[in-house]
Image (tube, rainbow, N blue to C red):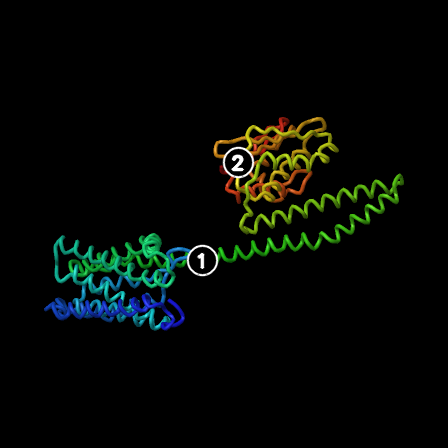
Amino acid sequence: MGPAFTTFPRPLKAAILGVPALGVVLVTTVAATDAGAFNVVQLWRWLLVPGCFLTIVLAERFPVKIGLQQKISLGALPCIVAALLLPPGVGPVTAAVGVLAGNVIVRRTWSETAFNAGNTLTAATLASVIGAIAHDGDVAQDLRATVAALVYLLVNLALAVMPAALHSGQPYVTLVRQAVSATWPASLTLGACAVTTSVLAVEAPIAAPLPLIVLPMIYRMNRAIEAQAKANEQLAGVLTAQRRFLTDVSHQVATPLATIMTNLSILRRANRGRPAEEAVDDSVAEAERMKRMLARLRSLAHADEDVPLRRELVDLAELTADVVRAYTAQAATSGVELVTDVSEHAHINADKDLLREAVANLVDNAVRVSPPGEKVTLRVDRGAAGPMIAVADRGPGIEEERLPRLFERFQRSDSGSGLGLAIARRVVERHGGTIRVKTAPGAGSTFTIELPG
């Protein structure tokens, strides 16, 4: 709730003091007006006082996970049991004192401890008035107990959200909706378990522990969730280290590689027409290939970082025209013609640089596999779900056995680094789109990027 009570705004102070005061007033009123406020029908119910108290303390001390990012206390179960089976002057106080002790043990602030205990006292008192189970009952009593449990859960949640709303300034109703959405399955499960246990304790004592079978299940689920969270954390660390490694290697190798290429260029000019020229040319070609691979490693590391996309309005026709201009010289050297076919001038909000990188990788692959005299076509159109860019070549096609893993990293053919398609897929997926390929041996391949409209 905050570092110090004196720094809280006045409405929050009023809530922190008012809710416990409300609980005390309610339980005092019930004790004064209800002749049976302290009468116990069966003596065994007095054993519930220490039992519920200890269970509530343990539940506060050891909350369990019901989701990777969400913990919940099982204390609602014994609190409801105490409200339903103990007298109205005893049950709510038992629940509130248990919550108070549990909060003290986990070292919550005094203001939070007082508020939580007051919240429990208020909700439990209302539940005990509505549906306390006094004796072997009928269907009407069981229904009242069910309503009482529901009232406990709703009042407890409604009061619990109040300090957060007052402290943060967020709308109270919004926070209530969020809390209900996050906790309703677990809360209803605990409430149903508490009502069933309470009813069976009176009507069929031997069967009363049976609903508690849900607790070992919750415990096992909790352990599984914690194990999964730990595994996810370790995996995230490995992936972060991998991305950092790729980035570091790319940067560390780029400088010496540039020096090597410069020296090779000098040697090539000095040995023009001599026998060593061919060896130097081969070395330059390999260095250029390594340079392209490092650039793609950097692109892949950047695409993996999950940093927010720098979105802007992108004209897909202009983007493809830009890629064509960049690769025209390379295509001409290979005897391949680059053409564009724009059926629709589509505009999307996208990271222009990343999307251009994805299309460029497809074009680079298409130019490399296309025989001299063929065309590589970039088509911009509208697909079933939104704008699309298709890159079609007339190369040899792709073997069927390579298709299932085609977009995985380092799944390369005889030429290329095996990174271009992985980069393209990662970029497209980050934009919420899809990428697919249509190919046939000897008939070329068409890679289609489809983006959300």
Q: Estimate the x, y position of residue 8 in percent, counting from the top left.
A: 36, 69
Horizontally, residue 399 falls left or right of residue 44, namely right
Horizontally, residue 146 falls left or right of residue 221, namely left
Q: Is 343 rendered above or below residue 12?
A: above
Q: Estimate the x, y position of residue 17 in percent, counting from the top left.
A: 28, 70
On residue 236, the disc is none
Amino acid type at circle 2 is: Glu
* Count of numbered labels shown in the rendering: 2
Res 54 → quadrant: bottom left
Q: Secondary structure at mark 2?
A: strand
Nearer to me, 283 or 5: 5
Q: Is 324 rendered above or below residue 28?
A: above
For the question of whether residue 287 can be seen, the reply is yes
Instruction: Quarter of the image for the N terminus: give it.
Output: bottom left
* Sequence-first tag of 2 and 1: 1
Q: Secondary structure at mark 1?
A: helix
Res 118 → quadrant: bottom left
Q: Estimate the x, y position of residue 32 in percent, counting from the top left.
A: 13, 71
Decide: few, some or many residues near mark 2? Use Cα within 10 Å; few <14, some 14-19, many ≥20: many
Horizontally, residue 435 falls left or right of residue 201, namely right
